[in-house]
Image (spheres, grey):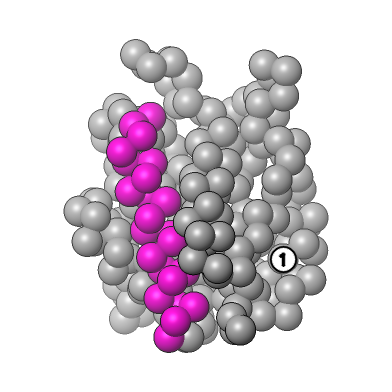
């Protein structure tokens, strides 16, 4: 029997009847059109869940609907699971196109969340991603006062899968090959924790 329930939270909202539910979270209108973050987040969560299901790993999509569910609701859903490990799935954005790369956030201080982040960084490095890190406290994850990281009961990370506002990262986020690669980073992290614990 699995020890953990892996809780996927695809950030922001999807598209309903052609209308983006979180219109501000989007890429520039480059050659493949606008990439809405909530749509790509949901696609990555779907891919991760399918991989987990095939391996009989307990994995829950906390936000299966396309509505932009509030942060409080997301946390309430996560906290229903006694042994949950929460993974919030996002893509980054910045005002300057030069910003790029992959990062994982945890809440302040040392906890099991940092262990999840370190495993995720290990597989991101194997995938040859540019890693954005903060080693000031001895590990690689960045720390932030994000609501979902602060209030989720179990270990919690927020992964920023590249930058929608960087053209090369945008191309990757629109690529079937790279979406599989990004989903596999999360899945391999889950699989290692499911097998070995934290």
* Prevailing SS of the magenta stretch: helix
**The quarter of the displayed image where residue 23 is located:** top right
Q: Is residue 181 above or below residue 77?
A: above
The boundaries of the magenta stretch are 174-196
Q: Specify whether residue 76 is painted magenta.
A: no
Task: Report if residue 86 is visible in the image.
Answer: no
Identity of the residue drawn at 56% across and 60% down: 53
The structure residue drawn at horizontal position 50% and vertical position 60%, both measured from the top left corner, is 54
Q: x, y percentage for residue 118? A: 36, 73
In the depicted view, which residue is nearer to us: 12 or 4?
A: 4
Quadrant in which the N terminus appears: bottom right
Relative to residue 70, is residue 192 depicted above or below?
A: below
Position of 62 with respect to 189 (left or right) is: right
Q: Is residue 183 magenta?
A: yes
Left or right of residue 37, residue 131 in this image = left
Q: Which residue is mark 1?
A: 78
Q: Is residue 94 above or below residue 186?
A: above
């Amino acid at each position: 029997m699995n020890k953990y329930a892996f809780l996927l939270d695809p950030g922001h909202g999807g598209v309903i009847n052609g209308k983006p539910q979180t219109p501000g979270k989007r890429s520039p209108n480059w050659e493949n059109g606008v990439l809405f973050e909530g749509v790509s987040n949901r696609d990555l969560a779907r891919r991760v869940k399918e991989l987990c299901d095939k391996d009989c790993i307990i994995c829950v999509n906390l936000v299966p609907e396309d509505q932009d569910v509030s942060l409080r609701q997301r946390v309430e859903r996560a906290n229903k699971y006694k042994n949950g490990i929460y993974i919030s799935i996002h893509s980054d954005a910045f005002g300057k196109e030069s910003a790029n790369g992959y990062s994982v956030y945890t809440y302040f201080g040392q906890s099991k969340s940092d262990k999840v982040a370190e495993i995720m960084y290990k597989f991101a490095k194997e995938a040859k991603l540019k890693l954005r890190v903060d080693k000031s406290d001895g590990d690689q994850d960045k720390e932030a006062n994000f609501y979902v990281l602060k209030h989720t009961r179990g270990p919690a990370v927020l992964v920023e899968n590249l930058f929608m506002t960087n053209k090369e990262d945008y191309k990757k986020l629109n690529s079937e090959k790279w979406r599989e690669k990004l989903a596999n980073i999360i899945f391999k992290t889950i699989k290692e924790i499911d097998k070995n614990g934290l």
